[in-house]
Image (tube, grey):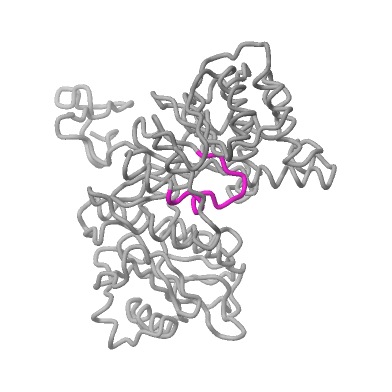
Amino acid sequence: MSRKANISATEKASFGRPRLYAVRAHYGQLDKQPDQFSGAVVVLDDEGGGVVRHAAAARALCFDEDTTVVVLDVAALRRDVDAAAETRDTKKTRGRGKRGWQQALEAECKTRDVLGKDCGRPIAKALARLLMRATTGATLVARGALAGVALKLALSRDPHAATCNVSRVVLVEPTLSAVAVNGLLACKTPPARRITVDAAFADADAQMRRGPAIAAACGEGISVIAPDDGGDAVLRAFLPKTEDDDEEAAVEAAFGADDSRGRRLRCAEITVDMSPLTKQPEQRFVEVTTAELLRGDDEADEPAAACDADDRGEARVAALVVRGGRCILARSLRTPKAWEGMRLPSAPAVAGEDAVAGARRAIAAQLDIDIADQAEQMAPIPNLPPLMLYRASGGISTVVFMKALQPPVEPQEDYDLSDEDDDYDWYTLSRALPRVDPPTACLLRTAAFALHGAVEAGVVAKAWGGVFGGELVAAVAGDAPATPAPSSPVTPPRVVGPCHDEANHEDACSCASDPFSC
């Protein structure tokens, strides 16, 4: 068994490894599609928040060129390398060297033979896992000091570089030191492969000093002075640099616009881990909303505490209210707070009261929606029995499935905005899980599969374009259809065991109750 098999997802998220964010024009959430990263544009970014900074470029390429844009964010990797330099303890920083990030970038450019473990090799591995099934090579975009790493990936004979599947490198205002010129461009060892390298330099002096060296090592490519783009769509998209004050407006404009086919930009974080079933790398997509992009990691909601302050371990009744792919979570606005983080609206159970009446009472108490008004806004979902929530205090909550009766009133781009002064907000499953306690997270996962099964069986109707927890069900089920196609006959399974009626059952026993008693 792998030594990482028992590492939790939370601990993995803290690792200083590159993170991948895909942006594409689509009608719904991004998921796995065949050959979806062929010809993709991959942007190296070490400052964090790369999707926000490159939103305008992604809009231009996705809408006009029908291209997938991937931001390869190495900010966490940079953080670990800098931390290793400060602590001088490589064991606590997972093997990183004792130099800072800028020194690591400089050291990467000293030779084209071997990729360094601080930045070159982790980036190459991330690219290889992203583009492992792409039939067409990707375009790698780098700005400033990251240009040296991009050039090394294009020229190096290191085996990790050979698996990157990059066919073109675009340098935007590159900063190449004399070390990079001597180690990468003036090297006598011929490159392992010829990759097109195009560059837009910051000024004429930079073009005169670095342009001929790049052309000699990589062949003739586009060599222009910014803001000239040489007629190239990728350079045209990335040359305008978004100022910090304009980032929020740029994100809202990019992700709120529709193209000529009615599609919008969608963003998802891609994780690539070893599948426990196939023992092969498996890509998974987690939706990233506009609100999460603008909020950033530092402003994320605090997770729930282990046990709520108002929880005495008594029996409770709670409501799981869903609307399309989202559910309601309640927050405490009291001082001091009755509970931390978010939770399902709940209230102590009352003897003799049915579960639906208790759920409505909890909604009235914690969401400030009067019981008289609830009849027009929400109703219990028929044919779905309640679930049991086993709380950290030892108490048990009966959770009633309920559905919203009215569509959202806010525009689609505001679906995932949170209002800290409101009693509740709507959350997708991927956004809800980090905001609730572990028992509630387990219940929400269970509810996702229960709802999906009810929809597939036709017991519950799909409303407003989705089903709560659809991203989890899709990740577990993969790309296989839920039911076989009509044109594909289903062969009944052969039963291993005694069958006492072989004349009628022949190869497969069809007894519904007990195949061994026929």
Residue 82 among magenta residues: no
Front residue of 184/491: it is 184
Residue 437 position (above or below residue 10):
below
Image quarter of residue 511: top left
Task: Give how far across and how far down residue 368 sits, in percent.
Answer: 40, 85
Give the quarter of the figure containing the C terminus: top left
66 lies left or right of 434:
left
Q: Residue at x 18, y 26 (%)?
A: 505
Horizontal side of residue 338 vs 251, given as left or right: right
**Residue sitting at 43 percent across and 37 percent down?**
234
Residue 276 seen in the figure: no
Q: Residue at (24%, 50%) from the top-left corner?
A: 456
Q: Which residues are magenta?
A: 43-56
Residue 340 position, x and y percent, is 58, 73
Locate residue 95, reporting x and y percent. 75, 35
Q: Nearer the viewer, residue 367 or 194?
A: 194
Residue 46 colored magenta? yes
- Report which quarter residue 3 is drawn in: top right
Residue 347 seen anywhere in this rendered image of the structure = yes
